[in-house]
Amino acid sequence: MSINKESEDEPIRIGVFVCHCGTNIGGVLDCEELAEYAATLPNVVFSDHNLYTCAEIGLTTIKEAIEEHNLNRVIVCSCTPRTHEPLFRSICEEAGLNKYLFSFVNIREQCSWVHMKKPEDAFEKAKDLIKMGVARATKLEALETIVVDVDPSALVIGGGISGMNAASNLSKQGFKTYLVEKEKNLGGLLNSLYRLFPNDQESSELLKDIEGRIQADKNITVYTSSMITSIDGFVGNFEVEINQNGNSIRIKVGAIIVAVGATPLKPINLFGYDGKIRITQFELENVLKNYSLNTNNIVMIQCVGTRNEERMYCSNFCCMSALKNALIIKEKNPDAHIAILFRDMHTPGIAYEEYYRRARESGIIFIKYLPEKPPIVEENKIKIYNEYLGTEIIIPYELLVLSTPLIANEDNKQIAQLLKVQLEENNFFLEAHVKLRPNDFATDGVYIAGSAKWPVDITESISQGYAAAARASTILSHDTLEVEGAIAYLPEEYKDLCRGCEICLKLCPYKAIRKNEKDEIEIIQVLCKGCGVCVASCPKKAIKIKHYTNEQILSEIYAFGGIKLP
Amino acid sequence: MNFEPKILGFLCNWCSYAGADLAGVSRIQYPPNIRVIRVMCSGRVDPKFIFTSLQVGIDGIIVMGCHPGDCHYLEGNYEAEVKFKMVKLLLNLVDLQDRVHLEWVSASEGVRFGEVVTNFTESIKKLGPSPLSGENFDQHLFEKLKAIELAADGERLRALVARKRIIMEEGNIYGEKISQEDLDEILISAIEDEFLRQQILLKLKNEPLSVKDLSQLLNIDSSVILKHIISLKARNLIDYDKIEGITPFYQKL
């Protein structure tokens, strides 16, 4: 990055290039006259107009003019900066001008195209926009982008199916990977499952396969019975402390994946749960492992402790677990009577819907219940109101199975605080954006996979493990990271103004602001995205932002108002 | 001749600025009165920008950000909304509140961008020229607006507004969550105080004045003025200049 064209005392020398964009602009606005107008504005030493400024000849004109007229600011009046700013910035850089000394004036999308029926008014508007652009350019400053090193290694928190797949994938891409699991064994909830949908594979088989690969992988270091105790640093450079059975281990990683999973809810005080003849779907898995069922009458209740006021969410896989387990029972004991009491059956896709069809065919009975009239569980029978019959049905049972949801782990809060990431209202981890960045956190370099974010089944957990690994590799595959120059900072001379109210710390969505050991506010350049909210909010106006400074914005306002900046 | 208002728009780069681009690509036609300042986030729009725009004679100011829940920076638009609410409350004091507007426009709403700009331009046309523009420039109003700008730019109001969402969501340092209504009440009373204090300070900047003088100049009961004089003196913003008879005169420090 070059900043050689900029020095404090050098007078401002602006070059303005007005683009015809064929007839897109030139057909509505007189570009030659606009260029002449620009030449009359303060600090403008050169102006020109081209048929296409973004074409080779236009770009050459800019480069030559920078050279010839010793320009230290360049303005292109053409289309939208959202598409063409990178191109013109790079041309300025090629000519030795800092890219932040380039400024864009949009006279196509926001002028010639939208006011084509009023060319005279559009012309006046274009003049104003150029005047505002020149005022802003006068206040522009050369900025440096900073470059930080990236540690090509990753930490995966949680050794369940999602975490193991993420770790294995990262390792295969060549990145040193640390896998931290709080329990004694890897596998998470896989350890307590019997067979898996949709292929009826034994859970232990899948676990053995992936665990074997992890253990044999020299590029993966596994820490079981371990907890994360501290995380410091930022994207590319995290310093992590792990506690394994009282021993402290320190590692350095470039990216972190959160795959801590979730916990099955124990339905205390719900539907007579006793853990013996009234058990959860998860406990049934264990019963099925060593098939010890000698009962013929089995009832399952869905949506136990979920989709209610306390937990608004659907746990996603419980319908499938119930279908799968009911079919396993039917397979081992075709005479078994099984009834599934449900609110809505959720079996998306071809393979899952197939389970439902098979269940119906095998004689499993499905009875819908209404949330306001839930089943009443008695000693050995269940009373359920059937809305279609308009009457109550009584079903005898010897085993009652309650499908309970996954709930957020108790230590999620602690981990979220260490990582400076957010939790949603049910204490699951909150992604950066539900559609645009589903496996990222807002905090750079930290990613999420599996049921830590939301209850998901095994297939989805594996996919998300891969997704998070792929996202992490976008950081890890580079030796260095370049950081945007247009960011917030606390100038040395304003440090005394700060009275430590910490409002900026709370408002920063990227946790880019922290207090250092001297109790001073510090903005971590790598993490700042330059939104400017802290700048507009600081009660003492101590924090400033580069490239969108108050002076720059006010200069545009004054230019439009027709008043010189005081 | 028809009145053609000067309209200024602060557009978020990620949503409404892109929406305006889409309006262009779709050749949507809207009134050419608006000039645009591109910002990275509507939360960057310092209230000062809006008051300054009014002071330089711009007839209408519109701020556009991402729809709730869609902010490119997660929550910047909520901050914009909180700040804008204060701007409206302050402008209520001088009856300029209808000249400013906040709107959510996404990158895909090209047609809607055109409609929003058209409607806002029409509403400003109906209001007529700003009393701070052209020949009918109202010096008295200008001074009041200056006091408003200084009030909004002061530590007290900036802190109150910046802390608002934190207090509503996380509670204050005692862990008490305060309702929106209670916070608004606090904000309104702070706004009234700060507005008056800034007006007093502006008057005292020019010449030393007594409580009675200020009461007459600002057309406000002298007991109210006295209350603020005491508070300003305690904050070391003003001091005695002289005492004539038994009447103290104050000056800005």
Image (cartoon, grey):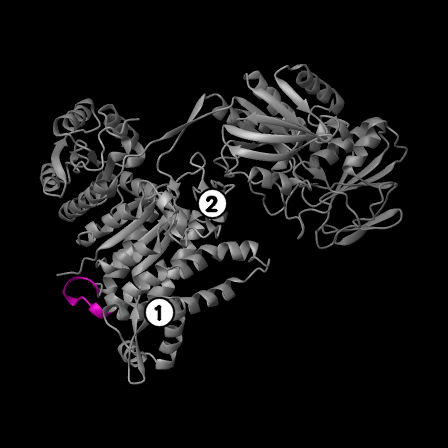
The residue that disc 2 covers is A520
Foreground: A107 or B163? Answer: B163
Give the distance between the C-alpha atoms of the residues marked 1 and 2, in whole angstroms: 32 Å
Residue type at mark 1 is Arg
Q: Position of residue A266 (x, y in %)?
A: 77, 43
The boundaries of the magenta stretch are B132-140
Q: Is residue B19 left or right of residue A507?
A: left
User: What residue appears at the point 33 percent right and 40 percent down from the top-left corner?
Assistant: A546
Foreground: A496 or B72? Answer: A496
Q: Position of residue B186 (x, y in %)?
A: 47, 66
Residue type at mark 2 is Glu
Farthest bottom residue in view: B245
Report crowding for label 1: few under 14, some 14 to 19, many 20 or more residues within 10 A (C-alpha).
Answer: many
The residue that disc 1 covers is B197
Nearest to the eye among marks 1 and 2: give it: 2
Is residue A43 at least partly visible in the picture? yes
Q: Quadrant of the N terminus of chain A?
A: top left
User: What residue appears at the point 79 percent right and 53 percent down from the top-left corner?
Assistant: A392
SS at badge 2? loop
The quarter of the displayed image where residue B194 is located: bottom left
Q: Position of residue B241 (x, y in %)?
A: 29, 73
Q: Is residue A438 left or right of residue A178?
A: left
User: Label 2 is found on which chain of the structure?
Assistant: A
Q: Position of residue A539 (x, y in %)?
A: 41, 55
Is residue A193 at least partly visible in the picture? no
